[in-house]
Amino acid sequence: MKIWDVSDLSFEVPNGLGGRLAACRVPSQLAGASLTRRYRPFRPSPDDFCEFRYRDTDFIILEMFGDNSRFLVAATDSPSARAAVADVRTAFAAATWLGSIRDAAR
């Protein structure tokens, strides 16, 4: 999957075949990650639709303006943030959106 690096603490992924559900599914499959807020289909939601914690770092996934071709995955700054961002980026790069959708529907 194509990934665009924005900064040391953030990157963008395509809002492709799976949409918000699949984007929330990727961090939920990381060992040690915990979702603190996830997207709920068919309910109004803000631009930031998913929050999770991984390796003592808080992350947020958002869709700028609620209608964009990319999702921004960003981390708060912490001592372990850069290593955590690298792991999360690797998980998104390896994700297959259609597989994520099928898993999210179960």
Image (tube, rainbow, N blue to C red):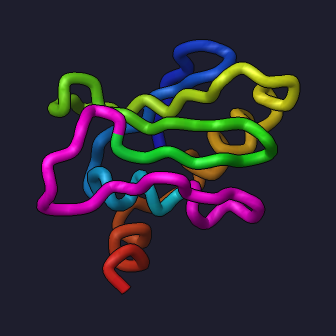
Relative to 43, residue 4 above or below:
above
Q: Is residue 45 magenta?
A: yes
Work out whether residue 16 or residue 47 is closer to the camera in this orientation and state it. 47
Give whichever of 105, 2 is nearer the camera. 105
The image shows residue 92, relative to residue 48, as above or below, that is below
Residue 95: image x %, image y %? 52, 57
Q: Residue furthest right?
A: 79
Instruction: Name the residue located 49 percent from the left edge and 24 percent from the top edge.
Output: 4
Q: Position of residue 5 (x, y in %)?
A: 56, 20
Q: Is residue 33 left or right of residue 16?
A: right
Kindly report the secondary structure that dominates the magenta region of the rendered protein.
Answer: loop
**In the picture, residue 83 is in which quadrant?**
top right
**In this rendering, position of residue 96 left or right of residue 80:** left
Of residues 3 and 36, the one drawn nearer to the viewer in this rendering: 36
Q: Is residue 37 left or right of residue 10?
A: left
Which residue occupies 53% across, 53% down? 36
- Residue 31 pos. (x, y %): 74, 64
Q: Nearer the viewer, residue 22 or 50?
A: 50
User: In the current view of this chain or complex, which residue is farthest to the bottom?
Assistant: 106
Of all residues, the one furthest to the top in this rendering is 7
The quadrant in which the C terminus is found is bottom left
> Is 38 a magenta residue?
yes
Q: Magenta segment range? A: 27-48
Number of marks in picture: 0
> From the viewer's perspective, is 46 left or right of 71?
left
Q: Residue at x 33, y 55 (%)?
A: 39
> In the rendering, at what x and y percent does residue 21 appear?
33, 60
Occupied quadrant, residue 7? top right
Q: Residue at x 28, y 47 (%)?
A: 16
